Structure formats: C-alpha cells, structure tokens
Image (cartoon, rainbow, N blue to C red):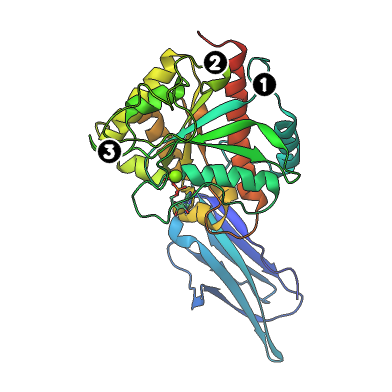
Amino acid sequence: MGQAPSDASVKRGQAITFRWDTNCGVYGTWKKDGLTLHSDDRIIITEPTPHLCFKLTIPNATEEDEGEYTLELSKWRGRVSGSAKVKVLDYAVAWRKIDHQGNDKVKTALREFTPSNPETQRLRLLLHGPVGAGKSSMANSVNSVFQGRMNVKAHAAPSTGKSETTRYKMYEIKDEQGREMSFVFNDIMGLEGTETGGVLTADIISAIKGHIKDGYEFNPSSPLSCGLYYNNNPTLDEKVHCLVSVIPANRILLLEEDHGLIKKMREVRDVAKNLDIPHVVLLTHVDNCPLVKEDLDKLYFSKKIKKAMENCSIKLGVPMNRIFPVKNYHEENSLDKKVDSVILDALNNIVNFANDYVIRPIE
Ligand SMILES: Nc1nc2c(ncn2[C@@H]2O[C@H](COP(=O)(O)OP(=O)(O)O)[C@@H](O)[C@H]2O)c(=O)[nH]1
Ligand SMILES: [Mg+2]
C-alpha cells in the first residue's frame, strides 16, 4: 500500500510534511498522538481524489507539533496504518559534532597516552564543584567507559545534598585488562554556597598547587597548612595539571552572579589562571533537558544546553570551547555509545589541555 511516512526532525519554524502514496483508492484519517487531525489555519491536510496521495503539512512547526503522526487508511476490505514521530529541534544543525564512530580511536589514543614531559608520570585532573554536581559520578563514568562495564569506585551520593566525599581521593583509571592510564582524577569534597560548610576554597587552591596529599580528611572550618598530609615542596608530578569544575547545567542558570558558589568557583578559577593551569567546565545533568533525555545525540541541538553553556561562560569567566556538557552514567546498568562519546570527547580535550600545561608549566 505504498510507502508509509518516516520519522523526521525539523527545526522550529520549518515545515513538517508527510506524504503517503497508495496504489489503490482508500480513505485516510490523520491522527496525532491518537487524536484525529483536521485542516485548520496551521495544518493543511490534502487528499486529492481518487484518494491515492495523502499529504499533511504544517508550514511553521512549533514545539507543540512534536509527537506521533499516524495515517489510518481504510478500504472496504480492512484497515492499514503507518506512523512517524516528529521532533522539533531548536537548531537545524548541531553547533558541535558528536562522533560515536570515533569512540574507539579516542579510547585507544587515551590508553596509549603518556605525558610529554618525563617529569610527570601521569596527569592530575582535579574535579571540583558543588555537592551533588556529579564529580564522583564522573570518575566512575570514565572508569566504566574504559573497563567496558559499570564501575562504582568513587562513592556517588543518592542526591542528599550533603557531600559524600570528605577525603581527598585519587582515582586511577584502568582499562579492562587492569592497565592504568596516564591520568588520574582527584576527587575533592563538594563546595557549598555558604561561608561555612563544604570544602574551603583555600584547600582547593592548596590542592591545585599540590600541597594536599591523598587521603586527607577535609576540615570545613580550617584549611590545611602543615602536618602529615601537607606537602611542602610538591614536584610538577604532584601538582594539578587541569582544573575541572563540575556543575549541573540546570543549576548554573538558577545561580545569581553574586551567589557564594559562583564567587568561590571564580576565586579558584583565578588562581588556576594565574598559575597558567588550564580550566575546563563539565556541565552535568544535561538529561534534565527533555530533548537530551530522550536522545543524547540531540545535545548540541538543544537551546537549553546552549543557554546553560553561555550562562556558565559569563558567570565563571570560561570560554565556550572549554565548556563540555556531559551526561554521567548514574542509573544505567550497561554502557551506551552516545554517553561514551560525550564523556570521551570531554576527557580527550581535558587530557590535551593538561598535557599542554606540563610541556611548559609556570614555576
Ligand atoms: N540525571 C543525572 N544524574 C546524575 C548525573 N551525574 C550524577 N548524577 C546523580 O547526582 C547525584 C550526585 O552525584 P555525585 O557524583 O555523588 O556528586 P558529587 O557530590 O559531585 O560527587 C547522584 O545521585 C548521581 O547519580 C547526570 O549527568 N545526570
Ligand atoms: Mg562526591
């Protein structure tokens, strides 16, 4: 009975057009999400006699036009129907590319990577940001990507609002054969917006400079300045080589410019900048955007994500090309090439920036 309509994505303002050609005269009814459609000032339904070509056009698509369109054809001998889903996108083309085909290549390059400066055994990537941003989940997600299975080494909190990570903890990344990568994550206690509570900015700054040793239990009322866990003379290997701020995409939009969290994150950023240490932002929880939740490949089609990135760029003073929207593995029980893709893209950039720094560090 001819070719049924197929799924389509259109940009807001563009036309949605479905056409179904049949080879015998039938009667047709268009439905959207189960409800019968009729021609009106927005929808044009044409069914020229002798009922061989059925057309539905919406010249100016809006978000409300998203849904499943069905054409039911009826003949005196029975019925047949075909359906197609329509997505109305914010942008016609993605402003950044996601390339699943490149996943294996990036994974291999990262597995084989060694820092360009022999004084550095491995690159240290410091994860910092508000409680619940997804720092521990990021360390777990990266391990999962390389091990090809779900990994829960870093304790990710069940959204309680309190920091689960209270010690300075280094997470090695290993592949499925147990071989260590030449980069590690340092997971730090979460920041809080208030004066008291959460990790102190002074401690984050000490960590960046390599003064804090692995295993230190943070004291939110007094910064570390001496003792067993204080490293007086850190080598280049012990310093942080890339500062990675982690913040939920939806949260950045809600924070005023003078909010305690923003001020603290800017303060930390300024220190990294003065030390010439690269700074990158991971915007997590992108799956709060319905378009992205349904299909992570639509990440760079989403207006909400672009807005969050622009907002973040202004509030934290980070260029757009240093901001990476990512989705962590958090409720999944198997890997997904789309999730792997966005994580690998961010990680590959972070490792390259960190490596650029160790080639020419500022003493
Ligand atoms: N939907 C969603 N949930 C996330 C994401 N990343 C982390 N989570 C969840 O957010 C909560 C806090 O994550 P966690 O990694 O412990 O945050 P941390 O305090 O920064 O270490 C946990 O319940 C995670 O499962 C993400 O990208 N999307
Ligand atoms: Mg944590």
Which label sits in the foreground, 3 or 2?
2
Which image quarter: residue 130?
Answer: top left
Q: Residue furthest front?
A: 228
In the image, is 131 to the left or to the right of 2?
Answer: left
Secondary structure category for the residue under label 1? loop
Number of the label disc, if any, that sits on residue 115: 1
Where's ligand 2: which quadrant? top left
Residue 354 placed where, x, y %? 58, 22
| Label 3 or label 1, whichever comes before in sequence order | 1
162 versus 182 height, above or below: below
- Mark 3 / mark 2, whichever is N-terminal: 3
State the residue at coordinates (53%, 59%).
331
Q: Quadrant of the N terminus?
A: bottom right
Which residue is label 3 attached to?
A: 193
Quadrant for residue 335, please give it.
bottom right
Q: Amino acid at mark 3?
A: Gly
**Marks 3 and 1, Cα distance to the nearest angstrom?**
35 Å
Q: Residue type at mark 1?
A: Pro
Q: From the viewer's perspective, is 82 left or right of 309?
A: right
